[in-house]
Amino acid sequence: MPTQINTDTLKKAEVATTLAKNMITQAIEQSAANPQLAEEALKQASQEIAQAQTMVSQVQSTLQTQAQSQQQGQS
C-alpha cells in the first residue's frame, strides 16, 4: 500500500506561505511610509508561516507513521 500524502493540507500550507510572502512584500513597500502598517504585516506574515509549518509537520508526521506501519507489516 503506497504512502498517502494529504495534498489538501499541503495546498493550505502553500496558500499560507503565499499570503506571508505578500505580507512581507507589503511590509517592505510600507516600511518607510508607514512603519506601524509594516510591523502589522510582518506579524501577520509570521502567523501565516507558523501555520504553514504546522501543516507541513502534520503531513510529515503522517507520512512517517504510514512508513513505519508499512515496515512493520512487512516484517
Image (tube, rainbow, N blue to C red):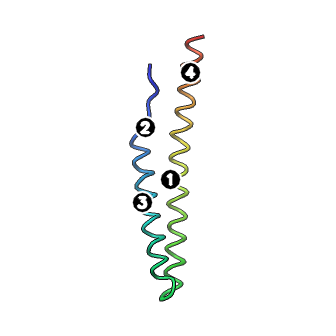
Label 3: which residue? 18
- Which badge, 1 or 2, comes first in the chain's sequence? 2
What amino acid type should be assigned to the residue bearing mark 3? Thr
What residue appears at the point 45 percent right and 72 percent down from the top-left corner?
25
| Residues at marks 1 and 4, CA–CA distance in whole angstroms | 26 Å
Residue 69 numbered tag: 4
What residue appears at the point 59 percent right and 16 percent down from the top-left corner?
72
What residue appears at the point 45 percent right and 80 percent down from the top-left corner?
29
Quarter in which the N terminus is drawn? top left
Q: Residues within 10 Å of mark 2 (few under 14, many from 20)?
A: some
Residue 44 location (% of width, % of height): 50, 68
| Residues at marks 2 and 3, CA–CA distance in whole angstroms | 19 Å
What residue appears at the point 50 percent right and 39 percent down from the top-left corner?
59
What amino acid type should be assigned to the residue bearing mark 2? Asn
Say above or below: 12 vs 37.
Answer: above
Label 1: which residue? 52
| Foreground disc of the pair 4, 3 | 3
Label 2: which residue? 6
| Residues at marks 4 and 3, CA–CA distance in whole angstroms | 34 Å
- Which badge, 2 or 4, comes first in the chain's sequence? 2
Q: Do labels 1 and 2 touch, CB within 8 Å?
A: no
| Foreground disc of the pair 2, 3 | 3
